[in-house]
Amino acid sequence: MAGAETQYSDFHLAGDYLLGGLFSLHAETMNSPHLSPLAVPTCQMYKLNIAGYSYLRAMRFAVEEINNSSSLLPGVSLGYEMVDICYFTNSIHPTLYFLSNKHSEVQLHNNYTQYQPRVLAVIGPDSSHAALAVTHMLNLFLIPQISYMATTDSLNNRERFSAAFRATSSMEQQIAAMLLLLKEFQWNWINILYSDDDYGRQNLRLLRAWSTGICVAFQDSIPVPHSSALFSQELQKKIQATISNVINSTASVVIILSLDLTLPFFFQEAIRQNATGLVWIASEAWATDPILYNFPDISRVGTILGVAAKESSIPGFSAFRVSLAGGTSRQGSDKNTCNQECDECLRAVQGADKIVGAQGERIDFNVYSSVYIVAHALHSLLGCNARRCRKRTVYPWQLVPEVKRVNFSLLDRKISFGRRGDLPNSFEIIQWQWDQPNYPFMKIASYSTRNERLHFLKLNISWHTPNNTVPISICSKQCEPGQRRKPRGASSCCFECLDCEAGTFFNSSDPYNCHPCPTDQWSRTKSQACYPRLVKYLEWQESTTVLLLLISGLGLIATLVILVTFATHSDTPVVKSAGGRMCFFMMVFLSIGFVSIPMYIGIPTEFKCMGRQTVFSLCFTLCLCCIAVRSFQIISIFKMAAWLPRVYHYWIKYHGQYTFIAVILTLKVIIIVTNGIIHPPAPMLLTVEDDPSIIVLQCNKSYMLTLLMNNIIDIVLSILSFCFAFLGKELPKNYNEAKYITLCMTCYSITGTALLLVMSLYEGVLVTAFDALGIVVNLLGISIGYFGPKWYLIIFHPECNTAAYFQTAIQSYTMRQN
């Protein structure tokens, strides 16, 4: 290590406490596809890394400001020693130099508590790779290290690297800013290129982990050459193939996560292959690189946006950067080194100062603030007041906790470390401007790491597109409202748009499915919401309902009148021939049937639904059963007594009519109960196919099947009644029920057929109304059609209601038969 000071571009300022600076001052040729880091021992004719030189000057400027300050470290002088690490290829040698003692040796000890290395703290280096390599060594000695550009997440490990700090934000924040930029312009179909090193791979991992809603059309690595060698033929072919794939990709946005070292040949090849019309998004490492900006024909590649550190202005620094070094404060300076004391170097720096100034003092401020962080930590450690400090021997490990606790303001910016050892600095979104070389990096938006929001300051961005329209980079256009996505391929950004069908709706929280509407709601095609259906039922105020109730009321009155008339003439032949006491039984159930009509009106309830399914069906079955029994009895009297006397004897002896009625009633109850179990009589909402905006509130989903099951016995009884009526068509006129029974059964057949036809063609309230009307017609058919003529004889022809009249009819029938 004895020759360290002459091997590197080192700048040594003697002082009470010494800082170390690691910078990249290598020279590089602009038009070469490789970068050639040099030690820069003299002012050679190369394009000097002016940015790195500017960072070096920022450190010196900060040290001299602090030494001239009366409030910070009064009576204490800071010294500095700076070395060129040649980008990241020579970081071990200068690090060992900083770790050595005053004898230029790194001694082995069991306990380094009392060990005093050459420097108290280290500023730098710039790249993440070099910073991590240096950190492994410095952390063993607990020497505070503040990197001004490294963004690697590996430095976040506070247990492993407790002495490592960063004067910049982490990778996570620049990735967050990139994703907000993509979201702002609705770019979800992108190409990702990353350098084949730790910086590129770590940024790629973060980008892929956080990029929800962003899809990658193409992803590839950019090879990283050895900085002292040309790109090999293999690496050149790799870059050529990568550029070709980017050009052929359907995405028009390219994110490049790379250090600046790998990019000159890349963009040279992009220009050669005419990769135009693209949007390039730069990571913070090369977003404001003046070398790339001045690359020949770089403007042909399209629009370049980038995430850059917040621009800051350090008062007096611009003039200091191009001024001659003061010889009075310098010790051990070497006239052969490029330290601005040779005229050629000074002219080179002054000539490139416009380029450096155009960057904005972004990274310079990080270096500047890093020195102030160490100064404030030392100020606290030495117990300084406004006039003096308690000078004593300070060991680097004592400074580490003070660095962690720093909290001060510098040029209106708060400086304090977060829990992971980085400063929560803000980022900016910049655009490269080709027509304004004095202001090449235009700020278009700001990003704060505290609130994680992107605030656009300039909306008139210069896009390299026809009519200056915002470039589009999507795999599939956004679906119209009310359309769902059908994936096309493996990427979630590529899809087809399909309309949501009627009865379903689209919910933005689930873009791939259409959700069915609830039963009581409806929707049209491409709906984004469901709407309440109009619930329909047979209402009381409808004209159909009024007419139905009027007819039912008249039928009930007529039945009651007939019932009263028959009761007052219960001993007359007409009443006895109509069935006697069975007549009253029938008319009671007819009255109950008329009274049950209101169950079909109004909002259906479980009680009403039960009544609809049981009351009329049971009443009508009993009436049909009585009619069939009465018809059979009359035939038995006139014919069966002679044909089958034994059967007639048993019929009379065991009260066959009541036995028959009891059996039929039992079967009917069994059918009703079974039907109720299979088809529970509960109100439910049923949609109408012709009009989805309407929903019908009715009692049973399987209305037709329920009706058919309940009418099985009624159909059988009606057929028996027809048969008995036919057999009795020649009986005496007073006992001939054929035409009356035929009338009743005809009403039943017509209404049943018509109801089934209506239920087949229509649905909704019309079915309910027609069902109720059929009930009224069937009840009227028995009440008026069967009992009406007999009531007419009692009231208007009392002479026919005598025993003599009936006896004469029987004798006439007997004489005809003989």
Image (spheres, rainbow, N blue to C red):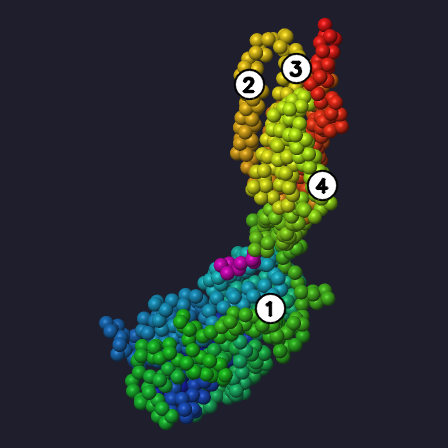
Q: Residue placed at 67% from the left, 72% from the top? A: 460
* Any part of residue 735 in sight: no
Amino acid type shown at disc 3: Ile
Residue of label 3: 635
Q: Assign a secondary structure to mark 4.
A: helix
Relative to 591, say whether 365 is above or below: below
Give residue 655's mark. 2
**Mark in front: 1 vs 4:** 4
Quadrant position of residue 600: top right
Residue of label 4: 550
Quadrant position of the N terminus in the picture:
bottom left
Amino acid type shown at disc 1: Leu
Relative to 632, say whether 515 is above or below: below
Give residue 758's mark. none
Residue 309 picture location, percent across and down? 52, 74
User: Is label 3 in contact with label 2 (beta carbons under 8 Å)?
Assistant: no
User: Is label 1 in contact with label 2 (beta carbons under 8 Å)?
Assistant: no
Magenta range: 208-216
Separation (CA) of disc 1 from disc 3:
107 Å
Q: Assign a secondary structure to mark 3.
A: helix
Quadrant position of residue 686: top right
Amino acid type shown at disc 2: His
Magenta stretch containing residue 212, yes or no? Answer: yes
Relative to 131, say whether 77 is above or below: below
Give residue 305's mark. 1
Side of 625 relative to 408 (left or right): right
Q: Residue placed at 51% from the left, 58% from the top? A: 208
Q: Residues within 10 Å of mark 2 (few under 14, many from 20)?
A: few
User: Is label 1 in contact with label 4 (beta carbons under 8 Å)?
Assistant: no
**Mark in front: 4 vs 2:** 2
